[in-house]
Image (cartoon, rainbow, N blue to C red):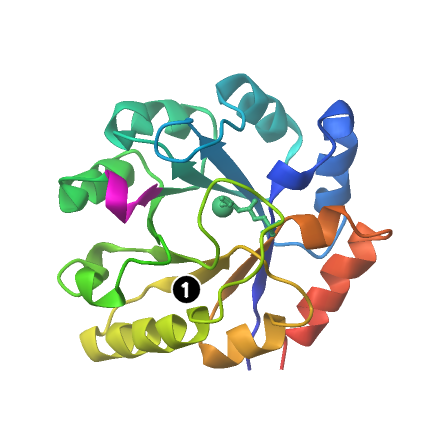
Amino acid sequence: MKNTLIAPSVLAADFGNLQRDIEMINNSEADWFHIDIMDGVFVPNISYGMPVLEAIAKHATKTIDVHLMIVDPDRYIKTFAGLGANILSVHYEACTHLHRTLQAIKAEGMKAGVAINPHTSIDLLEDVINDIDLVCIMSVNPGFGGQSFIENTYSKIEKLKALITRKGANTLIEVDGGVTSANAKQLVEAGANVLVAGSFVFKATDPVQTIQDLKKLTTF
Ligand code: DX5
Ligand code: ZN
């Protein structure tokens, strides 16, 4: 049985009503909070930073999954642990010494994630997969919410799943970008364990119902 985890991306929330939107996720069937941190250098956009995450963490009652889209993420590992991150994902493309970075994240008591851009091959994770708790496959180019899903993602998920099985790794597969009820089931059939959804949840007329629908579609 597949029990897929749903992680609404707070990037699409209404920041004027942030507490309301956090409570909405708390009271929904969502499993995690997905927090997108962008620095305007690694990606062409700046999202929000520490004070906003601090405010979110104060109210959030579920796992906090932080996706760092920043250069030189090693500088901030301790900071994000202190802010309440439970999972910290860095970008493969932003790390010169990825293995060391993963150990540093774990040393701070967090789960260690690696996000990969659409152009980054799964093959590059072969020698480090056993050290990764979560791989976040970007199904859009990182930087913005509301973009359309890249179809090549399905075959990347299948490739990653095969790698995880072959290496006997214990790694979750997360998919991030353009997730909707139209592709959710197929993503899980391909091997995804965690689905991030921003616009699809927050732009819906009934976000709680939308989360429930995603959950239902991906539990089979
Ligand atoms: C994109 C972010 C995503 C984004 C997803 O750079 O990493 O988490 O918020 O938003 P949607 O679901 O709208 O594509
Ligand atoms: Zn993200």
Q: Is residue 61 visible?
A: no
Q: Nearer the viewer, residue 79 or 48?
A: 48
Taking the magenta stretch, the answer to whether it contains residue 180 is no
Magenta range: 90-94
Q: Is residue 78 visible?
A: yes
Instruction: Tell whether circle 1 marks a residue whose Cβ is less than 8 angstroms from ligand 2.
Output: no
| Image: 102 above or below 178 | above
127 on left or right of 9:
left
Q: Assign the N terminus to one quadrant of the image.
A: bottom right
Name the residue furthest top.
51
* Neighbourhood count class around disc 1 (C-alpha, 10 Å): few under 14, some 14–19, many 20 upward: many
User: What residue type is disc 1 on?
Assistant: Ile
The residue sitting at 47% across, 59% down in the picture is 139
Q: Main secondary structure of the magenta part?
A: helix
Q: Position of residue 7 (x, y in %)?
A: 58, 52
| Image: 103 above or below 30 | above
Name the residue furthest right.
205
Q: Position of residue 61 (x, y in %)?
A: 63, 39
Q: Nearer the viewer, residue 16 or 19?
A: 16
Mark 1 highlights which residue?
173
The residue sitting at 21% across, 55% down in the picture is 131
Q: Position of residue 74 (x, y in %)?
A: 24, 29
Q: Nearer the viewer, residue 63 or 161?
A: 161
| Image: 144 above or below 164 | above
Which image quarter: residue 210?
bottom right
